[in-house]
Image: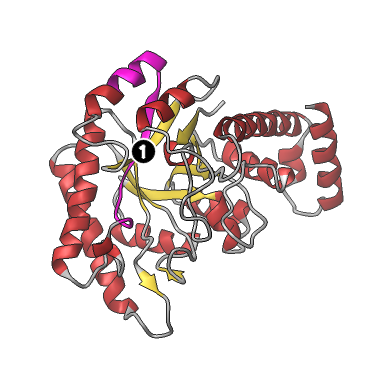
């Protein structure tokens, strides 16, 4: 079984543009980590630097991690929550702002080395456009690729083993985010062509891009560039970040099937936003659905699903097998 980790940005008071105060109470970072650590079969956490992990609380976080036997799986440099990043970060045309974003990612790599973090995600949240022809994408891509190369040079100079991952998303917070689809992000990954640079596929992001996720995961794995995953679910209209398998469980089975087919050994990351519900319920429901999907996939493969899929002609038969294996699991 693949290990599961939780992004702790999701288990506190969450705000949106319709309710800037949120419906709950703010939860200190340390308490969020303890909450995750108290849930069975959740072995890791994901954080941002400096908003959740920084020099002032690193020692305390290290103690809590040891107390609860947790690992920091992914540490992301926050480059979209501050005013200077409103028109971009790693691709910002203002060199000073761009350099600040690069330094933020480098700081996350430095802190990640202390905690033996395997993954650091780059999300180009504010690099993109809101109006037609607002942004010169030729310049945007030139600047972004140059920034990533600088970050990778820093990584190799310091002999860090951490993998850096692009996380594509088509929209929100910008109307259009650069590298908004899996294939677009993979183009840049292949252009840069560095073994420490790959993809984090967020299931919800792929869904709102109307992608066939079985296809996209296979494409990433074809180039051996799938380094991390973020699991959640939605109805393909907005990135709702509800627990995986709650909107479409068969789709979750399909995703897990393809990951197992490609021998994915990384983590199942949970990117959840329980605006109105208890975070523990979201986390436990996600865990249980992922484990159920794994059992279903195991049964399917035992009953010959791999052979059935080879010539692509057994659609109704596969649907029946999925249904029967869900019932059995």
Query: Image quarter for residue 177?
Result: bottom left
Could you tell me which quadrant the N terminus lies in? top right
Q: Quadrant of residue 53?
A: top left
Judge left or right: residue 260 versus residue 80: right
Question: Vertically, is 176 above or below 260?
Answer: below
Colour style of the rendered protein structure: secondary structure
Residue 38 picture location, percent across and down? 50, 19
Q: Is residue 112 left or right of residue 42?
A: left
Residue 40 visible somewhere in the drawing: yes
Residue 74 covered by magenta stretch: yes
User: What residue is rendered at 48% in x and 46% in y?
Assistant: 14
- Residue at left offset 54%, top offset 22%: 41
Mark 1 secondary-structure assignment: strand
Disc 1 target residue: 47
Please give the name of the residue rendered at 68% of the width and 42% of the height, measured from the top-left corner.
Answer: 245
Residue 254 lies in what quarter of the image? top right
Question: Where does the image place residue 207, in percent across and percent down from the top left?
Answer: 60, 57
Q: Is residue 266 visible?
A: no
The one of 172 and 145 positioned closer to us in this rendering: 172
Q: Residue at x 63, y 44 (%)?
A: 255
Is residue 233 located in the magenta-colored stretch of the structure? no
Label 1 packing within 10 angstroms: few (<14), some (14-19), many (20+): many
- Residue 30 % position (x, y): 36, 27
Residue segment shown in magenta? 62-81
């Amino acid at each position: 079984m693949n290990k599961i980790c939780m992004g702790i940005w999701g288990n506190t008071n969450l705000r949106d543009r319709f309710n800037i105060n949120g419906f709950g109470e703010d939860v200190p970072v340390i308490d969020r980590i303890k909450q995750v650590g108290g849930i069975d079969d959740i072995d890791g956490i994901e954080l941002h630097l400096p908003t959740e992990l920084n020099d002032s609380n690193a020692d305390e976080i290290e103690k809590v991690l040891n107390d609860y036997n947790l690992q920091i799986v992914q540490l992301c440099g926050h480059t979209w929550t501050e005013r200077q990043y409103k028109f971009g970060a790693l691709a910002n045309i203002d060199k000073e702002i761009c350099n600040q974003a690069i330094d933020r990612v480098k700081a996350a790599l430095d802190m990640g080395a202390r905690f033996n973090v395997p993954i650091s995600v780059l999300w180009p949240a504010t690099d993109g456009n809101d109006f037609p022809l607002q942004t010169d994408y030729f310049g945007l891509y030139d600047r972004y690729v140059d920034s990533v190369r600088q970050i990778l040079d820093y990584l190799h100079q310091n002999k860090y083993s951490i993998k850096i991952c692009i996380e594509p998303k088509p929209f929100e917070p910008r109307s259009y985010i650069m590298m908004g689809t899996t294939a677009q992000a993979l183009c840049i990954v292949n252009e840069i062509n560095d073994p420490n640079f790959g993809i984090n596929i967020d299931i919800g992001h792929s869904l709102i891009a109307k992608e066939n996720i079985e296809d996209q995961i296979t494409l990433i794995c074809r180039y051996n560039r799938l380094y991390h995953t973020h699991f959640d679910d939605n109805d393909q209209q907005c990135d709702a970040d509800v627990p995986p398998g709650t909107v479409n469980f068969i789709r979750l089975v399909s995703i897990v099937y393809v990951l197992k087919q490609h021998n994915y050994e990384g983590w199942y990351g949970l990117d959840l936003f329980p605006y109105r519900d208890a975070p523990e319920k979201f986390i436990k429901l996600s865990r249980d659905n992922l484990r159920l999907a794994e059992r279903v996939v195991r049964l399917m493969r035992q009953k010959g699903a791999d052979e059935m899929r080879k010539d692509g002609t057994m659609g109704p038969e596969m649907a029946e097998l999925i249904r029967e294996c869900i019932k059995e699991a």
